[in-house]
Image (cartoon, rainbow, N blue to C red):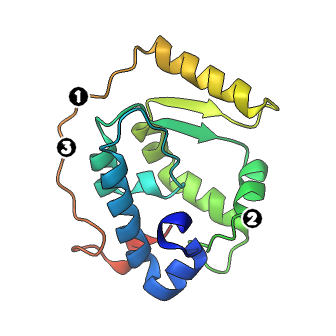
């Protein structure tokens, strides 16, 4: 997202609020879902929104990358991301989101893979490719539902990262 808009995520949220950020994210998901033979890395909030899940369904294999709370917090800390739950520690923020949305993360994924097992990126990529081949890669044949997009009929409080 940063390279798309030339701004850091924390600056986009500060200037455009979470609604503006989520609209940008949705537009990117729509554009990228039409690409062939690509790997698209999404942030942790993307899959929580029905409009993003809808445009991504049928576009390819969705892999959920998981890790321990400590590892996730270390990774997010390096990215200078704004908190969804202001006034909480980064670890508490992630834990709250995971507890509330875990079902969406797993429900939206075709494959889940742990990334905190002291493997190289090359090893992890090879294992993920193996899992995709085991499943016989083919985009999911699911009818896309129509959900409100960012800013449509949704209360502002529901647009946190």
- Residue 160, how many percent across, how many down? 47, 71
Marked residue nearer the N-terminal end (1 or 2):
2
Q: Whole-Å distance between the Cαs marked 1 and 3?
A: 9 Å
Q: Residue at x 28, y 35 (%)?
A: 58
Residue, x 74% and y 57% (percent of image)? Answer: 73
| Relative horizontal placement of residue 144, taking residue 51 as reference (left or right) | left
Camera-nearest residue between 3 and 117? 3
Q: Residue 77 carries which label?
A: 2
In the image, 134 versus 98, the foreground residue is: 134
What residue is disc 3 on? 144
Around disc 3, counting alpha carbons within 10 Å, would you say few (fewer than 14), some (14 to 19), or many (20 or more)?
A: few
Residue 91 visible in image: no
Mark 1 touches mark 3? (CB < 8 Å) = no
Q: Where does the image place residue 18, in percent across and percent down from the top left?
A: 45, 76
Question: Label 1, on which residue?
Answer: 141
Local SS, label 3: loop
In space, the residues marked 3 and 2 are separated at their CA atoms by: 35 Å
Q: Residues within 10 Å of mark 2 (few under 14, many from 20)?
A: few
Whether 72 is drawn above or below 62: the answer is: below
Q: Residue at x 33, y 48 (%)?
A: 53
């Amino acid at each position: 997202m940063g390279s798309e808009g030339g701004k850091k995520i924390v600056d986009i949220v500060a200037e455009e609020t979470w609604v503006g950020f989520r609209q940008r994210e949705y537009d990117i998901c729509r554009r990228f879902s039409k690409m062939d033979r690509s790997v698209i890395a999404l942030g942790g909030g993307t899959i929580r929104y029905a409009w993003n899940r809808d445009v991504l369904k049928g576009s390819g294999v969705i892999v959920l990358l998981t890790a321990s709370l400590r590892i996730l917090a270390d990774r997010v800390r390096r990215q200078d991301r704004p908190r969804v739950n202001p006034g909480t520690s980064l670890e508490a923020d992630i834990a709250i989101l995971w507890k509330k949305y875990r079902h969406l993360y797993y429900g939206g994924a075709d494959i889940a893979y742990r990334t905190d097992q002291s493997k190289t990126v090359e090893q992890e990529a090879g294992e993920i490719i193996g899992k995709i081949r085991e499943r016989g890669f083919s985009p999911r044949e699911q009818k896309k539902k129509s959900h409100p997009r960012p800013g449509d009929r949704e209360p502002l409080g529901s647009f946190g990262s």
